Image: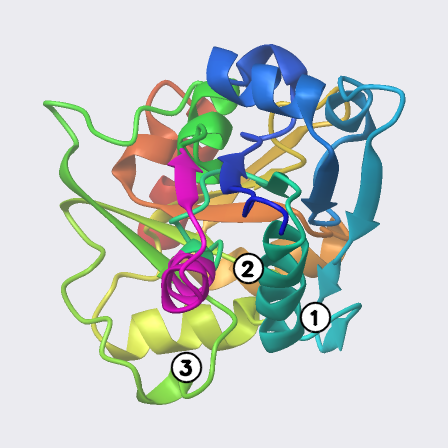
Amino acid sequence: MAKTGTIYLVGAGPGDPDLLTLRAARLINRAQIIVHDGLVEPAILALAGRDTRFISVAKRRSQHTMQQDDINALLVREARAGRDVVRLKGGDPLIFGRGGEETEAARAAGVPVEIVPGISAANGAAAAAQIALTHRDASSMVTFVAGQCKGLTDQDWSGLAGKGRTLVIYMGVKTAPQIAEKLMAEGLAPDMPVAVIENAARPHMRVLRGLLAGLPELVTRQRVKSPALIVIGEVTAREDQSVAQLAAEAVL
């Protein structure tokens, strides 16, 4: 009977292969099977060996190559067949990466599992855009939320953004109008600075800046597409005169 393989939940970081951990790069290089998300860059997949088998489980809004329960079953099945499986995810496996669900499935099946952290999308995007998520003069608190989820309008985001705080929104491009409306309804000033970081740490990265009230129009006008993060807070406007001018005009 074949020895049970190990499932490795590996963070691929924000996209640049140079930002992989050494552990992640080594596991990719020697992987028998790589089960990967759609946002993993081809340059990272190219680090794998010639005999590696690739299985894409790409997800897009309302479109899934494979449902999560089926992904869990695939990982367990391959490991039970004696193969080590690298489950490769953009960013970090445990931050909106469903790594918790896959870990639980492996444990329930009695399959060894190891989690290899990656640079999260938020950290990678902020660094690439040179936005300090915390700053002694602007923010001592950071919150990560999902902008694409069930019951978005019913969630209580009050107090997550505002003076001295930074709010990072994953998967918020399609719901930008609801996000802006929700935050302003919960008391956040319309002239709060925001930044939209598209394709962070990739050659075609864009950093778009504006104000909360203009977020929906900014996303539409600039035709922002995923992957993109929305950062809301005073940290996004530091040393950015265009946003400072917008804020001044909004007060007049």
Q: Secondary structure at mark 2?
A: loop
* Residue 115 rendering spot, x and y as whole percentages: 40, 39
Q: Is residue 110 magenta?
A: yes
| Cα separation between marks 2 and 3 | 12 Å
Q: Which residue is mark 1?
A: 61
Q: Is residue 47 left or right of residue 211?
A: right
On the question of residue 174 being in view, the answer is no
Q: Is residue 145 above or below residue 12?
A: below
Q: Is residue 188 above or below residue 192?
A: below
- Name which quarter of the figure residue 245 lies in: top left
The quarter of the displayed image where residue 235 is located: top left
Residue under circle 2?
171
The quadrant holding residue 243 is: top left
Q: Considering depth in this image, is 180 or 117 the residue closer to the camera?
A: 117
Closer to us: 48 or 242? 48
The mark found on residue 213 in the picture is none
Residue type at tag 3: Leu
Q: Which residues are magenta?
A: 100-116
Who's the residue at 56% across and 44% down the image?
3
Q: Which residue carries the number 3 mark?
A: 152
Residue 164: horizontal and vertical position, in percent?
13, 41
Q: Nearer the viewer, residue 194 or 147?
A: 147
